Image: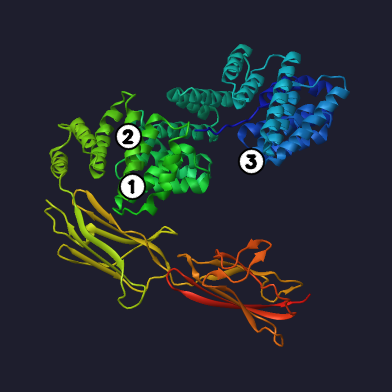
């Protein structure tokens, strides 16, 4: 879980060190200095008093007074830059103002032959870095600015006295860069330097807490964050980091449930505050609470509510999406509705977890078990469910975790039932043997009944699905005899499934049926065109199925069509050797022997019409391409014209064709011969 990182490089202590020196010399300056200098220093002292009292308005007014009294006086401008950096925490535009103040100070000091003071050097590094970060730069830009800030601070140490404030800032930069070893080394240098301002001290303690969190030393982190409150009670960052620590414990509730319960109690008192402050940490805590409740019995609805809130606030982490999928599954299952659509979303997320390198063995085990349950209860085939549970068993074979040993009882029971339903009785017996004596009496009794009814197979006999004219030429009649041997439950509609499947689209719809004792009868009237088969299944009380499937039958309502006509309708052609077209039928084939093609010549000529194809055979020979007279046509028809000289004018083509079901059609079109 990421931490809220308060990157506040603090030049204040160095400024105060300079202020202390100035205040120590006030008496001498009053005697030797000018009235303007006296006014400037007096105003600056009042500004520092206001800062100590937390009166920022007095600070700003007195700094302005000090600058006005003596413009070349550095201390007020150094303090002004520091105040602008502080204001930048809530108004990032102030960082650019701070950078401008510090840059002017640096130029002024160098122009008078002095080296820039430590507050100015630190302030420049701080302001530039914070101004860049406020613009949300690309990672490579941020990395470059961090490197520059580090170089500037290290350079300052070579020209000035060793400063604990600078080392705190260098440690903070190292932490942001993810260099924990370098961060800790800089923290050690703070004690060696022996000087540090109060602001830097609070940042140091918070930084110590963050390091402890990184190293998963949660108790040490809590102590460090508590120290911050002594120096800066109004700073909420350490408290937010402490909340992050509790959330991290809560997210890892599987490792120590008691510690997770304690963390949950601590976090509940923070949730309301975090919600009001709109802290980004609130989304992370919502995710942690949601994952925690997912593992609690009956906690799925509360978990989903927390996940919904977290998703509204921020993008969910991978682990949270995984736990959310489990919560949605548990909630849907609690509703006792076995609708595949309710499980589609969680199933997709759980499937992705199986190949996710971030997923632990336990995550993948849980995903396999849940997917196996979903497939077993809603899938058309039991094979995927068996594969998932077998995968779960393979995952649990390695670890010696008590969790896996307890969970494997449920896996063995599920596999026993699935192998029973798929008639793999030897494998069923193997899994029953692995749980014998380990289950309670009720479940053991259920499995004993399961084994006893292995031989009781539902049977379907005299099954027939045929086209029969009841009211139209497109009616279907289905009959069958059903039996469930050894069942204590009478045969009822809930044991029977009868579906009509359209094979081309794969769509299926149930057929209404009636039972008269063991006899089943169903009828479907005036069916649309298509290829169909009927599927009938019968299930006994323990899940054993008998099935029957009819042969595929056709309902062909449409006669053949004529496509790709040459010459086409309305065309004007300079010459004519043959009439060409393609015969197409939606379902059954074209009856070639039924095809007849006639051409009516333009009126006024010596020939009124010609038959080009009769009974599926061409009536005139052709040399290009070679076609013998009376040769049979194919569905791609080419009917040669007679060798006569053809008169110009409009020709009318008439084609008659039938399909194998006897559906017939006459098609006519005309074109013009214009040599």
Question: Does the CB distance between marks 2 and 1 fall below 8 Å?
Answer: no
> Front-most of 650 and 32?
650
Observer-nearest of 112 and 463 = 463
Distance between the alpha carbons at the discs numbered 2 and 1: 15 Å
CA distance for labels 1 and 3:
60 Å
Q: How is the image coloured?
A: rainbow
Tell me the quarter of the picture where residue 195 sits. top right
Name the N-terminal-most of marks 2 and 1.
Answer: 1
Name the residue that disc number 1 marks: 381
Task: Report x, y in % for residue 480.
Answer: 22, 62
Task: Name the residue located 77 percent from the left edge and 37 percent from the top edge.
Answer: 64
* Rendered image: mark on residue 90: 3
Could you give the CA–CA distance between mark 3 and mark 2, rounded to whole angstroms?
56 Å
Residue 609 as seen in the image, left or right of residue 419:
right
Query: Which numbered mark, 3 or 2, is in the foreground of this view?
Result: 2
User: Which of the 4 image quadrants contains residue 403?
Assistant: top left
Q: Is residue 269 visible?
A: no
Q: Given this view, does label 1 or label 3 mark the residue nearer the observer?
A: 1
Q: Secondary structure at mark 1?
A: loop
Q: Position of residue 590 (x, y in %)?
A: 49, 67
């Amino acid at each position: 879980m990421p931490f809220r990182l308060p990157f506040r490089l603090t030049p204040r202590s160095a400024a105060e060190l300079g202020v202390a020196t100035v205040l120590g010399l006030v008496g001498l300056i009053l005697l030797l200095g000018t009235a303007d200098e006296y006014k400037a220093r007096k105003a600056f002292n009042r500004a520092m008093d206001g800062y100590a009292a937390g009166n920022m308005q007095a600070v700003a007014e007195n700094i302005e007074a000090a600058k006005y009294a003596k413009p070349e006086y550095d201390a007020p401008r150094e303090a002004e830059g520091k105040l602008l950096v502080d204001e930048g925490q809530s108004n990032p535009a102030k960082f650019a103002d701070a950078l401008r103040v510090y840059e002017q100070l640096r130029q002024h000091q160098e122009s008078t032959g002095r080296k820039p003071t430590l507050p100015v050097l630190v302030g420049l590094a701080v302001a530039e870095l914070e101004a860049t970060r406020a613009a949300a730069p690309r990672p490579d830009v941020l990395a470059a600015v961090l490197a520059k800030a580090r170089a500037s601070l290290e350079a300052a140490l070579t020209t000035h006295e060793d400063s604990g404030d600078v080392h705190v800032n260098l440690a903070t930069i190292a932490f942001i860069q993810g260099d924990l070893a370098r961060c800790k080394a800089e923290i050690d240098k703070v004690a060696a330097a022996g000087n540090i301002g109060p602001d830097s001290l609070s940042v140091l303690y918070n930084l110590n807490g963050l390091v402890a969190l990184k190293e998963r030393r949660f108790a040490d982190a809590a102590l460090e964050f508590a120290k911050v409150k002594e120096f800066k009670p109004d700073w909420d960052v350490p408290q937010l980091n402490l909340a992050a620590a509790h959330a991290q414990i809560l997210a890892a509730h599987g490792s120590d449930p008691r510690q997770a319960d304690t963390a949950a109690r601590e976090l509940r008192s923070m949730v309301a505050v975090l919600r009001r402050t709109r802290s980004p940490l609130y989304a992370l805590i919502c995710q942690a609470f949601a994952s925690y409740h997912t593992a609690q019995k009956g906690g799925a609805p509360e978990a989903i509510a927390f996940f919904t809130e977290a998703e509204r606030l921020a993008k969910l982490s991978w682990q949270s999406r995984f736990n959310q999928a489990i919560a949605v599954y548990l909630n849907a299952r609690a509703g006792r509705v076995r609708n595949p659509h309710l499980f589609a979303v969680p199933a997709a997320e759980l499937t992705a977890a199986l190949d996710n390198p971030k997923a632990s063995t336990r995550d993948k085990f849980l995903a396999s078990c849940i997917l196996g349950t979903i497939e077993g209860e809603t899938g058309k085939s039991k094979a995927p469910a068996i594969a998932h549970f077998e995968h779960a068993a393979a995952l649990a074979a390695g670890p010696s975790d008590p969790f896996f040993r307890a969970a494997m009882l449920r896996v063995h029971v599920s596999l026993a039932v699935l192998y029973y339903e798929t008639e793999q009785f030897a494998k069923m017996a193997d899994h029953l043997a692995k749980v014998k004596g380990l289950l309670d009496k009720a479940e053991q009794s259920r499995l004993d009944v399961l084994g006893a009814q292995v031989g009781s197979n539902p049977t379907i006999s005299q099954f027939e699905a045929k086209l029969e004219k009841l009211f139209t030429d497109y009616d279907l009649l289905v009959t069958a005899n059903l039996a469930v041997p050894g069942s204590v439950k009478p045969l009822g509609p809930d044991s029977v499934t009868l579906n009509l499947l359209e094979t081309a689209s794969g769509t299926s719809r149930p057929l209404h049926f009636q039972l008269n004792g063991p006899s089943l009868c169903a009828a479907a009237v005036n069916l649309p065109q298509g290829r169909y088969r009927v599927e009938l299944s019968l299930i006994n009380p323990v899940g054993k199925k008998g099935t029957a499937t009819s042969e595929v039958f056709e309902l062909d309502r449409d006669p053949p069509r004529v496509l790709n006509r040459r010459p086409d309708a309305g065309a004007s052609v300079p010459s004519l050797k043959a009439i060409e077209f393609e015969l197409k039928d939606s379902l059954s084939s074209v009856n070639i022997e039924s095809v007849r093609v006639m051409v009516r010549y333009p009126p006024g000529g010596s020939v009124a019409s010609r038959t080009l194809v009769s009974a599926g055979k061409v009536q005139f020979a052709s040399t290009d391409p070679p076609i013998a007279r009376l040769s049979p046509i194919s569905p791609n028809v080419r009917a040669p014209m007679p060798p006569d000289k053809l008169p110009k004018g409009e020709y009318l083509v008439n084609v008659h064709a039938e399909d194998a079901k006897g559906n017939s059609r006459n098609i006519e079109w005309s074109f013009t011969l214009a040599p």
